[in-house]
Image: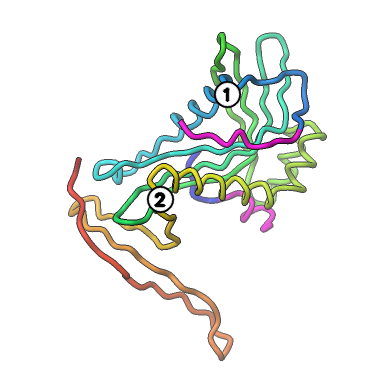
Amino acid sequence: MKNYLCVLTIALMLSLVCFGCAEKKEGNFRLTSDQMKSLVSQLNEMDQYEGYENQFTEVKTINSIKLYGAEKEDTQIKLYMWDVSGSYVKYKDAAYEVAGGCYPLIVTAEAEGMKLRINDIQFPEDSLAYASSIRKMFPNKYAEKILNESIETADKLYRQQNEQIKNYWHVPISKEHFALDGDSGEVLIVRTTEGYDKKGEYYYKKEIVDRGFLKKL
């Protein structure tokens, strides 16, 4: 599920959980709070960061979701949702996102007592096929909401996720880039700036604002 690329940008340019919505859910199945917790816990586990950063420091992965509705047929439960995932590290007095993604999902699960067991996850296609794949995947009552509320929903979940990280480590989220050398353990904190100069020419600059070293755990 990791791809550090929000499909919103490509297609439209458009345990910690966001129980994510005070609004009424649609569908013929209602999740209990325990089932919601088990759902997000499994998503967190599936999304565990596999980069070398976790050899040097804790990497915290969080999935925040907005559940649009759930439909049950026989033993199978289909969950229609938006998911924002992120993996973060803490370095000195700030947290840095090292991987993440955001996408609408259809999760197929089964109820096991007070919990859910995920059996399958469907992702939409990217690029120009994104919108049409959403309409093919999701019932119309969910598809239109997903397409119409995409930017607002992803932004809200991302901000809630940042708040969860702030509360977990009690540090702010940095907008700068955390770069770790997997061999030497050297850490570079890189600030990037981009824009257009007075002549209208595009520029992209990188500046190292801090450096240090981490030892393997």
Q: Which residues are magenta?
A: 6-23
Name, please, the residue furthest toward the right.
140
Residue 89 x %, y %: 36, 48
Residue 62 x %, y %: 47, 38
Say what secondary structure mark 1 lies in.
Answer: strand
Q: Is residue 11 magenta?
A: yes
Q: Does 30 sit left or right of 34 as displayed?
A: right
Q: Does 45 sit left or right of 107 as displayed?
A: left
Which comes before the other along the chain, label 2 or label 1? 2
Residue type beneath disc 2: Val
Q: Is residue 116 above or below residue 183?
A: above
Q: Residue at x 41, y 63 (%)?
A: 176
Specify few, some or many for label 2: CA neighbours under 10 Å numbering under 14, 14-19, or 20 or more.
Answer: some
Q: Residue at x 73, y 42 (%)?
A: 146
Q: Residue at x 82, y 35 (%)?
A: 140
Q: Is residue 149 magenta?
A: no
Label 2 or label 1, whichever lies nearer to me, is 2
Residue bearing mark 1: 120
Residue bearing mark 2: 98
